[in-house]
Amino acid sequence: MEALIKKEVERIILVIMNLNDDIEMACDTYSSLNQVDDIKAQAHEVLSKYNNLLSKASPEEKNDLTRGVGTKIAELEEHLSRLKEAPE
């Protein structure tokens, strides 16, 4: 994987890990609407960056990205759906 892509993937993974923790906390405790909206905006930004990387990647890089980040992306999407169901 190209060095720039690898660095961006590392950033995406770090942000996803932090977001998943934030989403868990927001679901388990009372969170303001602003906090929830901020988490959602950050998550959508990360998903957009990931999709942008996929669109620019070669077929081989796409496979590497999917293997390296795909599970974490699916986990983030699952947590986001849980956040949507959480009481406000």
Image (tube, helix red, strand yellow):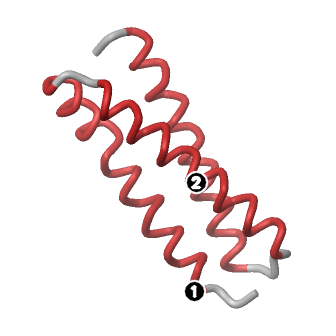
Q: Which mark is residue 73?
A: none
Residue closer to the observer: 72 or 33: 33
Secondary structure found at label 2: helix
Secondary structure found at label 1: helix
Q: Is residue 33 above or below residue 88?
A: above
x, y percent for residue 86: 64, 85
Quadrant housing residue 87: bottom right
Q: Residues within 10 Å of mark 1 (few under 14, many from 20)?
A: few
x, y percent for residue 66: 25, 40
Q: Residues within 10 Å of mark 2 (few under 14, many from 20)?
A: many
x, y percent for residue 79: 51, 68
x, y percent for residue 38: 75, 59
Q: Which mark is residue 85?
A: 1
Q: Amino acid at mark 1?
A: Glu
Q: CA distance from mark 2 to mark 1?
A: 16 Å
> Residue at horizontal 29%, vertical 33%?
65
Left or right for 11, reference 86: left
Residue to which mark 2 is pinned: 43
Give whichever of discs 2 and 1 has the lower sequence position: 2
> Residue at horizontal 65%, vertical 50%?
42
Q: Is residue 83 above or below residue 16?
A: below
Residue reaching furthest left?
A: 59
